[in-house]
Amino acid sequence: MSASPSSLVTLSAVVTRLRAAGCVFAEDEARLILSTGHVPAEIDAMVDRRAAGLPLEHVLGWADFRGLRISIDPGVFVPRRRTEFLVEQAVPLARSGAVVVDLCCGSGALGAALASALGGVELYAADIDPVAVRCARRNVGAAGGTVYAGDLYEPLPAALRGRVDLLLANVPYVPTEEVGLLPPEARVHEARVALDGGADGLDVLRRVTAGAGGWLTPGGSLLFETSGRQAATAMAIVAEGGLEPRLAESDGLDATVIIGTRPSAS
């Protein structure tokens, strides 16, 4: 006789199944699954999906990002904890009511988190992936923002030109040849467009930086994440785009963020 679903959803049973599947943080993950699922059959199915290799956030349907529960749909890029450092760098550069654009927004986690931290902003976001756009509309919409579907700046309202205080760009920066080396949770279950940054990982950044000056207000800043080994090249790209680059790093989060500021009008 097979076990009933209810016998499979105790904490110890779920932990055992997750450990057998190779989940390193099985106990923490089990608690999250048990707190998210509503009935035994649902919890059992969630455990099966996690054991099959789906990212935990896709199984849960949400990710924790700076204390916010960000809705995450299957296939959508999962916001990394290290990217919280980017938001931390953005907070002191803006004020309540600032005009913020979240480019390559994925789930919209960056814009939603910044809006929460500042107590309200004029928020816009854009992504080329329609699946991400649908997901972001829930997260950004909850923060009072608007999400557009399209390639980088193309779908944004022209009225934003020269008005943007903060341009957050979670650009992909994995070199094409290295995408295949990523963990399966990313390589298999996240959209390639959110990972692949071209030959040297900086192709999308070049396009973002080339257009940033026309959208930023004088004194406004572009912020993006990159890797430590790409930082020097990325800084040069920012400077070539007419912005003043600054590097911020967090050893604890293994995070590298570059801030490019449009010079203030003289």
Image (cartoon, rainbow, N blue to C red):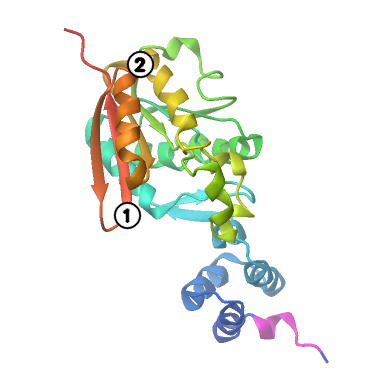
Which numbered dot is residue 254? Answer: 1
Residue extending farthest bottom: 1
Q: Is residue 97 visible?
A: no
Task: Please tell me which of labels 2 and 1 falls first in the chain.
Answer: 2
* Residue visible at 22% across and 35% down in the picture: 92
Q: Give the image location of residue 217, x and y in percent.
A: 31, 15
Q: Amino acid at mark 2?
A: Gly
Query: SS at mark 2?
Result: helix
| Relative to 240, residue 257 above or below | below
Q: Give the image location of residue 10, x and y in percent.
A: 59, 83
Q: Is 253 or 145 nearer to us in this picture?
A: 253
* Residue visible at 57% across and 76% down in the picture: 22
Q: Amino acid at mark 1?
A: Asp
For label 2, the residue is: 213
Report the quarter where the N terminus lies: bottom right
Highlighted range, magenta: 2-8
